[in-house]
Amino acid sequence: MGTEGANFRVIAGRYRLEVRLGRGGMGVVWRATDQLLGRQVAVKELPLDEELSADEARRQRERTLREAQAVAQLSHPNVMVVHDVVEDDERPYIVMELIDGDSLADRIARRGSVDAPEAARIGVDLLNALRTAHTAGVLHRDIKPANVLIENGTDRVVLTDFGIAQVPGTPTLTESGSFVGSPEYTAPERMTGVRTGAEADLWSVGALLCAVLSGESPFHRDSLGGILHAVVSAEIHPPDEAAPILPVVRGLLERDPDRRLGSAQAEQMLRVFLDTGRTPPVPPGPSTPTRRDVPERQPVTAPPRIPSPARPSPLPLSARRALIAAALVAAMAGAGVSAAALLMRGGGDNDRTPPPTSSAPRTSPGTSPPTSPTPTVTGTRSPTSTVDATLSPDRPPRIP
């Protein structure tokens, strides 16, 4: 048992939990003191739910250890440092570096959206950190403004909360049939269960760039079905504020993961923008040949062809995507899952980047009036949306 005091609690005989910084779906974060080394740290505590079965409690503990394993493998200035993992009274805790700063979501809620150079700077740091993570085989899978911290004084960008990361050699959290993530920032291939790879994290960065420039994700809708349709099949409309870095945003929000802009290429394009004020166009890749890459063909006189029996024309890609989105909604509805349950476990809309307050200028004309932001706390994070449904990202619904 941890040692209790009037205003503190000591766990593992070493870490004194002093001030709660925030609570989210994956745990409670405390400002704490490492009494052995005499330094300030952040401690993430896994909440205990007495209603959980033994198997569910085990999965929660595995999730906490997964986060520690994922981050411990990485050494990068833009990734949260993990110092220790301890267990006290059968509850695991992750001991991390303490970042004196707010989440990107909190900062936008108080100060308003950022300009294109600041968005590009944030994008460069995140893409660089992700390249290190992906090289190590670690997929974050929940990149959103609430999981990015901005350090006070230095403006250092820190990617945190690897709670649902995929680590080599460990089972994924979705194997039990649950979808875990933040829908407005989730790549379409993950949403439909086609595949999960490093490209999905890059899609999330594209959505995040739109959110920090305009105040909300381009895929925000008022219903679960609307979000699924927007991600999977609807035409994508980046905000007007993204115009200076539009080639990067469009390249990252390419629905085909094989044609999506890579992390190194996107980072380089943003660096060029920071140096010159202009973003170069996306150069054609192997799947997008230029005209000179296509060999010219001489006309050939072919013999007359015997017409084949008429076959029904295949559905266009947009129609197939719409059917997939509809099937996803039907699958979740059949499992008794509401839109509110997907967007926020426990209520609210904290997975959406809060719109700027009245004191901060609104940059995008014609958008919906901002709603009242959720009260923010230094170092907090929005809980990850979790849906327990028959829908599994590894098994998409069948479309006739």
Image (cartoon, rainbow, N blue to C red):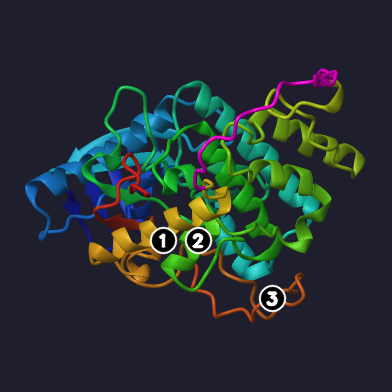
Q: Which residue is drawn at 79% across and 53% down?
A: 116
Boundaries of the magenta span = 293-312
| For residue 198, side relative to residue 242 (left or right) | left
Q: From mark 1 to mark 2, how far is it between C-alphas?
A: 8 Å
Q: Is residue 268 above or below residue 328?
A: above
**Residue occupying the far left of the picture:** 54
Residue 324, percent across and down? 43, 53
The amino acid type found where label 1 is placed reads: Ala
Q: Name the residue beneath numbered marker 1.
A: 326
Q: Are marks 3 and 1 in contact (CB under 8 Å)?
A: no
| For residue 269, side relative to residue 124 (left or right) | right
Q: Marks 3 and 1: which is nearer the front?
A: 1
Residue 389 or 324: which is nearer the viewer?
A: 324
* Mark 1 surroundings: few (<14), some (14-19) or many (≥20) residues within 10 A: some
| For residue 271, side relative to residue 43 (left or right) | right
Q: What element carries label 2?
A: helix
> Which mark is first along the chain, 1 or 3?
1
* Mark 2 surroundings: few (<14), some (14-19) or many (≥20) residues within 10 A: many
> Which mark is first along the chain, 2 or 1?
2
Q: Marks 1 and 2: which is nearer the front?
A: 1
| 108 drawn magenta | no
Residue 265, percent across and down? 72, 29
Q: From mark 3 to mark 2, how far is it between C-alphas?
A: 20 Å
Q: Residue 345 carries which label?
A: none
Residue 254 or 384: which is nearer the viewer?
A: 254
Residue 36, percent across and down? 33, 34
Q: Are marks 1 and 2 in contact (CB under 8 Å)?
A: yes
> Which mark is first along the chain, 2 or 3?
2
Name the chief secondary structure element in magenta.
loop
Q: Residue at x 78, y 35 (%)?
A: 282
Q: Residue 229 carries which label?
A: 2
Q: Name the residue beneath numbered marker 3.
A: 367
